[in-house]
Image (tube, rainbow, N blue to C red):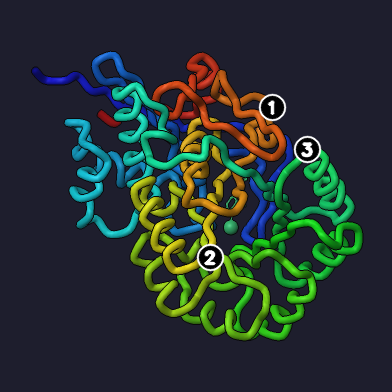
């Protein structure tokens, strides 16, 4: 019997409650690629973590659509298991965000078919994810009030974005008011080794870690920096695959890894990276890419895994959006989010609203 498979890609635009500023720019909205698979009555969804432009990584929405439509989609026609799909597309170089979108779609599909929630289907789950917040750059007074608000809401760690020249202003102001909170800073690649003295001067803030201070694909300079500072180094952009994680561990480039399933080719690679890292004594947490409720559910499921030991960037949906494209947004209690209990990601997509916010729809299969 031939299965009828349909795959559509919705490019949706959701405005943020608060524009999000990092060292590489300001985003006022999330422009997301949301995938909807229909196969013999089973409906699965996923999201590609790319954005409109190639500023976080070289991939963007256009390259992802191109790679998915022209090279990846033909490999999911028979709905293979995620590991089979990843083997089939192994000869395609890079484009791990595009691959992840279909890999995670297959995880949602297969866990829905099995009737089990994704976080259990993935293996040892704690049943909850510890949650931290990622606060963008803004006037220091606004950053401080967002920190205060986040602490009141019960977030388990505060991460703030920094950039070259604003690090002491932002971190100094926070530490003056909150000398003891769990605090981290994310530079999104804004420094180089010629800023060594400046980076050393951040040690006094007693950060839990400094995230991705140097270039997006660098490992060697991070390893050099790590020997010169007492602040633990966390890699985000640099870790695009299990092989990159292995090399980072081998050269001593990191103490901590921020795993984003959407950046590393999906959940199988995320589990592999988490195992490599934890076996080598590194800490692991789950980052985010300002996802809609569809992508968020995969991050929450993975963040519930016992391999993940630090709070992640998986805030509840209402941190980002007035209204999300899901009917069952996550709620945070005592700094924790519980993954959905329904089959797969458990996400119930609000199809009417999804269509309302769709800028473009592409039939993939
Ligand atoms: O570096 O972790 C990052 C958002 C967009 C691109 C890169 C990053 C981020 C965040 C926000 O820090 C994470 C989130 O809340 O989803
Ligand atoms: Mg980061």
Mark in the foreground, 2 or 3: 3
Q: Mark 1 points at which residue?
A: 322
Q: Which type of secondary structure does the marked residue at label 3 adopt?
A: helix
Q: Mark 3 points at which residue?
A: 153
Image x and y of residue 136, in percent: 71, 52
Query: What residue is drawn where x is 38% and y is 39%?
Result: 122
The image shows residue 289, relative to residue 251, as above or below, that is above
Q: In which quarter of the image is residue 48?
A: top left
Q: Which mark lies nearer to you, 2 or 1?
A: 2
Q: Do tag 2 and tag 1 residues touch (Cβ < 8 Å)?
A: no
> Which one is nearer the viewer's eye here, 33 or 248?
248
Identify the disc placed on residue 235.
2
Label whose residue precedes the other's in the sequence (2 or 3): 3
Q: Where is residue 310 in the image (x, y as percent from the top left)?
A: 59, 54
**Picture quarter with the N terminus:** top left
Q: How crowded is mark 2: few (under 14 residues within 10 Å), some or many (20 or more)?
A: many
Q: Is residue 55 left or right of residue 274?
A: right
Which is nearer the N-term, disc 2 or disc 1? 2
Sequence order check, earlier mark of 3 and 1:
3
Determine whether the residue tagged by mark 2 lies in a helix, strand or loop.
strand
User: Farthest residue toward the left?
Assistant: 1
């Amino acid at each position: 019997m031939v299965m009828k498979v349909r795959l559509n890609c919705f490019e949706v635009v959701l405005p943020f409650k608060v524009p999000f500023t990092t060292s590489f720019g300001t985003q006022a909205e999330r422009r997301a690629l949301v995938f909807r698979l229909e196969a013999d009555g089973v409906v699965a969804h996923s999201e590609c973590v790319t954005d409109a432009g190639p500023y976080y990584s070289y991939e963007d929405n256009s390259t992802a659509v191109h790679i998915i439509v022209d090279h990846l989609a033909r490999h999911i026609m028979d709905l293979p298991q995620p590991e089979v799909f990843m083997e089939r597309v192994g000869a395609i170089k890079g484009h791990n965000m595009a691959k992840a979108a279909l890999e995670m779609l297959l995880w949602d599909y297969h866990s829905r078919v099995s009737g089990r929630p994704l976080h259990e289907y993935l293996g040892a789950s704690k049943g909850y994810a510890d949650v931290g917040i990622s606060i963008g750059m803004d006037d220091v007074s606004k950053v401080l009030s967002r920190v205060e608000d986040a602490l009141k809401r019960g977030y388990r760690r505060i991460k703030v974005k920094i950039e070259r020249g604003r690090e002491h202003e932002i971190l100094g102001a926070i530490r003056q008011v909150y000398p003891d909170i769990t605090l981290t800073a994310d530079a999104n690649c804004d420094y180089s080794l010629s800023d060594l003295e400046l980076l050393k001067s951040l040690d006094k803030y007693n950060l839990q870690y400094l995230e991705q201070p140097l270039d997006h694909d660098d490992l060697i300079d991070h390893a050099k920096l790590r020997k010169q500072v007492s602040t633990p180094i966390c890699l985000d952009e640099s870790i695009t695959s299990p092989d990159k994680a292995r090399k980072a561990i081998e050269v001593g480039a990191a103490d901590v890894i921020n795993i984003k399933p959407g950046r590393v080719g999906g959940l199988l690679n995320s589990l592999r990276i988490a195992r490599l890292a934890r076996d080598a004594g590194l800490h692991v947490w789950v980052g985010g890419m300002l996802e809609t409720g569809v992508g968020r559910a995969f991050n929450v499921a993975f963040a519930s895994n016992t391999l993940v030991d630090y709070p992640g960037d998986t805030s509840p949906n209402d941190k980002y959006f007035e209204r999300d494209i899901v009917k069952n947004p996550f709620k945070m209690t005592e700094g924790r989010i519980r993954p959905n209990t329904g089959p797969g990601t458990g996400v119930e997509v609000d199809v009417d609203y999804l269509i309302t916010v769709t800028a473009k729809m592409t039939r993939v299969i």
